[in-house]
Image (spheres, coloured by chain):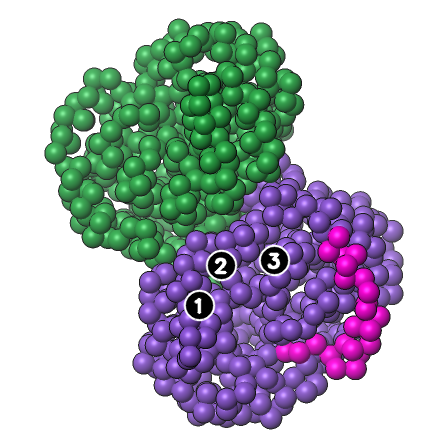
Chain colours: A purple, B green
């Protein structure tokens, strides 16, 4: 089965109208997808997308179209080769390499190929991955620039070591799901009353962790953090997220002020490019919490590729690895990052939310638990209660956990009626 | 004077047909420009571009068009604000931030604005910059994420310290020009005979440094390096350039084999994202040359922004800072990088070649010498003898040096007849 056509779509949801998703750097996002369908001339096709927050979504679509000639006529039998072809084109590589718009576009195509391959196999993507041999998994990865931190041979060993217990872990996921945390209470644009109400709702719904956006105004953050801690009690973790708002020194000062309320992690304290900056912040916050406890450092939703993740781990700059399904080059590069995290013994807690990111990333965390890390300790997938109704196979939550997906594919397919309403600029929502 | 229209062009030169520009990662580049003209409704307009090597140039053009609404109706009176507006749009920022296609597009617009401002002032860009006060220069920079390495106050001190001798240095540039090195002999696609002939020509033309591409085949590189050293003698510096071909370990091993021929620097030994990798390579090569001499490490043409340059300097990972006129966000971000290099005491040797990069970057090095570093020690601008004939105000070389530009503007303007021939895909060269 070959790819016979590549169709692209610019889909945007006007989320800024309700301040959903507002944070210190992103006051008015319109959650959007540069969406692609790989047609095969059969009734199976592959759906994928990259996520943006509005303006510029058309540039990602143009980038997908620039890459399309490289996938036309290809099969999805060898997804390692499929992904490497896209990032190794020498002329296209100049535009990155492996970062920014071209890499977002690569993610859309690679994820669409996995959706197609999983539908052909009749399995959800997490299961397709978990059923591969260690050799096959290692062959998915582009190993260039990794060997000073992790070699293919070491990766094979890690995967073989994780083999025992494989079926037990699947059974546990079927029974309990994969634990989640929720960002729904914490958007900067929400009132104190809404914050407290949604925080209490989250606890009642079974979440053991919530997240608050910070970094707008310090006194506001101190008040909101106190309100949230009071609302959820001592046993629920509260992560905070600055969305890259600070330089290194201000990050340390600001977090020291929030420390009495026991933030579990500070996410994106500074530029996602700043490995040494994260390392300095982590050192400074190692004993900044109550009783000399650690405030953890997390980042990843804007970390451009495996090479920056490699360095964040080599420099011991983060405590939590936040993979994103669409920022790096899709499933394949995320497999590399999961292997790096396992090598360095750091938990992976994916970024999600936006539109469709929860749907995609659940597959990666389920696979990580079954076949790579083998652990749920300190691992949670972000969950935000937005826009799931637009998907054919949306995430299912129960008791603060993601239920194990069962439908074949990558849960990435938008419902057909979405396009008439949300295609930009001619959909009815934008008219 | 306001910007009343933003016109964009996709211009490509079929350089791959002669293997000009071939290296270990870029076997067949077609040097291209995503080109923009800022119209004002007067006879003055601003010309700028970003450089690519072919496929994907249309994505950069689409990115310039996505940014165009932010410059329409603006003046170029405050170029600090002009540049910051482009990188701080919250929705667009998601696509980077500050890297890849959107940042290349930002460079085109910022550089075009400088061309316009310089034409209005009746000065070449280097002179417009050199005539600004220290306060005005500091205000050009986006200081976010820099304060752990360099503060605005420190930058002011650096600039004030460089003030004495300003006029003497301009007089020296008028007399001697700015020293250059040439990459023309060293493309991987050239025969041994052509390599030797062009290396000897370079010495005869007055160059004291040449550069060879390496990283394709080790035994070929050893042979070519021996031929080049024999051709130029002991006193001419030979830099080598791997164009990101290696992992950390292989970079060290390969360069150890070339060490007997005294390479002056190894350029782009590995991924431009790998700060810690460059630091490891630099440590390993600190005494790898003959008699325990240092093989320097250089990078920058693919370094995405000031934040990665900051870390390369903080980690003491490089000996040579290779700015690029179009990779980062144009003149403004390059001013930040020049200030960082001055703070850390590292020489700046710009990347050039391609199409138009020599024309642009000469202004930045001239400004650096007059007003920032105040030094020519170990500083050379790359020169490649390609495609200059297409510019209205091309670089002028004499005795292995760039002559000081005198025409108002940024030397960025293509000749009007270029578009009919090289516009892609409808120009006559592509028909």
Q: Earlier in the sequence, mark 2 or mark 1?
A: 1
Identify the residue shown where x is 46% and y is 35%: B282
In the picture of the structure, the residue carrying the numbered disc 1 is A286
Expressed as whole percent of the image width and height from the top left, the position of residue A260 reads 39, 82
| Viewer-side residue, A163 vs B191 | A163
Real-space CA distance between mark 2 and mark 1, rounded to the nearest whole angstrom: 11 Å
The crowding category of the residue bearing disc 1, from other C-alpha atoms within 10 Å (few below 14, some 14 to 19, many at least 20), is: some
Q: Tell me where the magenta segment starts and ends, as one range.
A: A157-180
The crowding category of the residue bearing disc 3, from other C-alpha atoms within 10 Å (few below 14, some 14 to 19, many at least 20), is: some
Q: Which mark is residue A317?
A: 2
Quadrant of the rendered image containing residue B374 = top left
Expressed as whole percent of the image width and height from the top left, the position of residue A27 reads 43, 72
Identify the residue shown where x is 23% and y is 47%: B155
- Labels 2, 3: one chain: yes
Mark 3 falls within which chain?
A: A
Q: Is residue B135 above or below residue B18?
A: below
| Viewer-side residue, A366 vs B21 | A366
Real-space CA distance between mark 2 and mark 3, rounded to the nearest whole angstrom: 11 Å
Mark 2 falls within which chain?
A: A
Identify the residue shown where x is 14% and y is 37%: B163
Q: Which mark is residue A344?
A: 3
Visible residue check, residue A243 = no
Q: Are marks 2 and 1 in contact (CB under 8 Å)?
A: no
Quadrant of the rendered image containing residue B321 = top left
- Does residue A115 appear to the left or right of B73 in the view shown? right
Mark 1 falls within which chain?
A: A
Per the image, label 1 sits on a secondary structure element best described as loop
Q: Is residue A61 above or below residue B160?
A: below
- Does residue B42 appear to the left or right of A224 in the view shown? left
Expressed as whole percent of the image width and height from the top left, the position of residue B162 reads 17, 37
Per the image, label 2 sits on a secondary structure element best described as loop
């Amino acid at each position: 089965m070959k790819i016979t056509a590549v169709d692209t779509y610019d889909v945007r949801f006007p989320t800024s109208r309700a301040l959903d998703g507002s944070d210190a750097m992103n006051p008015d996002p319109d959650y959007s997808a540069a969406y692609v369908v790989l047609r095969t001339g059969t009734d199976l096709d592959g759906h994928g997308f990259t996520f943006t927050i509005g303006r510029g979504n058309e540039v990602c679509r143009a980038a997908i179209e620039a890459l399309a000639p490289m996938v036309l006529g290809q099969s999805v039998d060898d997804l390692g080769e499929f992904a490497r072809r896209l990032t190794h084109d020498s002329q296209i590589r100049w535009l990155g390499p492996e970062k920014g718009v071209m890499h977002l576009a690569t993610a859309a195509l690679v994820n669409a190929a996995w959706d197609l391959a999983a539908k052909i196999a009749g399995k959800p993507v997490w299961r397709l991955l978990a059923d591969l041999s260690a050799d096959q998994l290692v062959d998915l990865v582009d190993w260039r620039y990794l060997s000073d931190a992790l070699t293919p041979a070491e990766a094979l060993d890690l995967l073989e070591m994780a083999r025992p217990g494989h079926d037990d872990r699947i059974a546990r996921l079927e029974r309990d799901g994969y634990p989640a945390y929720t960002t729904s209470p914490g958007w900067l644009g929400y009132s104190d009353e809404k914050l407290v109400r949604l925080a209490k709702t989250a606890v009642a719904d079974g979440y053991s962790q919530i997240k608050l956006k910070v970094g707008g105004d310090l006194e506001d953050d101190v008040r909101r953090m106190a309100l949230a801690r009071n609302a959820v009690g001592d046993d629920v973790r509260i992560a905070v997220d600055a969305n890259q708002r600070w330089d290194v020194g201000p990050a340390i000062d600001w977090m020291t002020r929030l420390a009495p309320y026991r933030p579990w992690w500070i996410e994106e304290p500074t530029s996602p490019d700043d490995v040494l900056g994260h390392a300095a912040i982590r050192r400074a916050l190692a004993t900044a919490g109550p009783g000399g406890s650690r405030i953890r450092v997390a980042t990843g939703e804007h970390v451009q590729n495996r090479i920056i993740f490699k360095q964040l781990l080599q420099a011991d700059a983060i405590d939590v690895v936040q993979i994103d399904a669409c920022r790096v080059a899709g499933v394949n590069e995320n497999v590399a990052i999961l292997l790096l995290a396992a090598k360095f013994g750091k938990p992976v807690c994916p970024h999600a939310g936006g539109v469709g990111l929860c749907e995609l990333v659940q597959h990666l965390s389920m696979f990580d638990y079954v076949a790579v890390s083998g652990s749920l300790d300190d691992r949670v997938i972000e969950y935000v209660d937005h826009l799931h109704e637009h998907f054919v196979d949306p995430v299912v939550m129960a008791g603060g956990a993601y239920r194990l997906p069962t439908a074949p594919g990558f849960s990435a397919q938008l419902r057909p009626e979405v396009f008439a309403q949300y295609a930009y600029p001619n959909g009815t929502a934008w008219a």
